[in-house]
Amino acid sequence: MNEKLGAMPMVAGNDVSFMTDYRGSIAEMASAIDAAETTVHVEFYIMSYDEVTREFFAALERAGQRGVTVRVLYDQVASARITGYRELRAELDRLTLSHQAMLPVQPWRGVYQRPDLRNHRKLLVIDSTLAYTGSQNIIEPSYRNPRHKARGLEWLDVMMKVEGPLADSLEALFVSDWYQETGELLTTPSPRAPSGPSQDVCAQVVPSGPAFEGENNLRLFNSLVYGARTRLVLSSPYFVPDESMRYAITTAAERGVEVHLMVSEIADQQLVFYAQRSYYDELLEAGVRIWLYRAPTILHSKFVIIDDAISVIGSSNIDMRSFSLNLEVSVLMASPRVVGELESLYLDYRSHSSELTLAAWRQRPWHARFIEGLARLTAAVQ
């Protein structure tokens, strides 16, 4: 189904590992850029030039100076909302690289399009052989927001590092996005097999977005949920499912699947947060266990575990915006070893969380229920 919808095959022979330290993952990606020989392709929803990401940009500069071809894509609307956007543009202009804002909204230049359609993908591909993808943006962990810093908020993410043919699949996605924004069709280096023994992880890139006729990630998630036999773990910072996804999750719980939903105790987007809370009663009544990652951390990791062999990681939230409006990238993996690593991550998250019970949830005040109901009415456009 995924190959039919997204034109990306399942490929074997991949080495996969996960990075869970926010600052450490940016530092590791910078080190990988320093080892690049031919190409560095960067595509992130949000990019910022700040004290945490400065070395990442310095690595891009060094790569360009030694003759590596460096290309950068970032979402224009999302990045422009961040403090210091002009600093980002100035730094990209200074460096010896090609860069392009994705899906720009610039009516003063005659560029018109729907501002609600955004490119939410996060990926870095080096020499067509090494790639990174997941939930993290290139920005310091409080998103340069004084209100976040005053509340002590920091984002918690997970990135996946992959060596092997899957990196070439991720680069194909970059090439298509680059072509969409610039009209230039890239010729990329032929991928090289990873050196040394391989974990031989089977994995598949699942692209999605308005350019595809089917809602690829929604069909993927629904199929996996309905196929779950014993256990289902969902980690999503924004949980605003459409009707089909809501039925799939509650049906799984009601037929005896152990369903766990991992979300944040607090949120940075209040309207989405209250809409999300409007689903908790139905989920808890069906038997879904809901875990709230304790404040002040914002749990931003996005992954799914199905039984003991299948997992998904990527940029997609479990919400209607990700299903219908955003360009997303997900990676489906058929590997018990990978499931074991994500299970360990889930258990670590759970140790920093509290469980929400149905009895406690139904004790919330009436005005909270009222706000949740109003927010639910806007769920389809959030």
Image: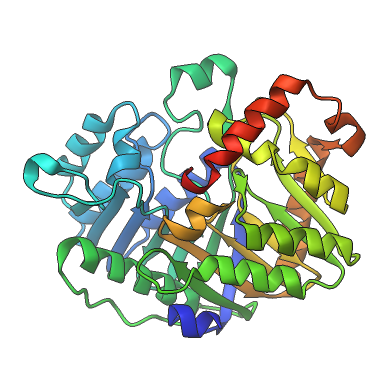
Please tell me in which quadrant of the rendered image residue 304 appears: bottom right
Query: Residue 365 at what x, y percent from top left?
Result: 78, 20
- Above or below residue 320? Residue 252 is below
Left or right of 220 in this view: 85: left
Looking at the image, which residue sits at the far left?
109
Identified at 60% across, 39% down, the residue is: 376
Query: Residue 183 at what x, y percent from top left?
Result: 15, 68
Q: Nearer the viewer, residue 282 or 293?
A: 282
Query: Residue 70 at what x, y percent from top left?
Result: 24, 58
Looking at the image, which residue sits at the far top?
150
Identified at 42% across, 58% down, the residue is: 123
- Above or below residue 166? Residue 147 is above
Left or right of 3 in this view: 230: right
Please tell me in which quadrant of the rendered image residue 171 appears: bottom left
Left or right of 69 in this view: 284: right
Query: Residue 313 at what x, y percent from top left?
Result: 59, 61
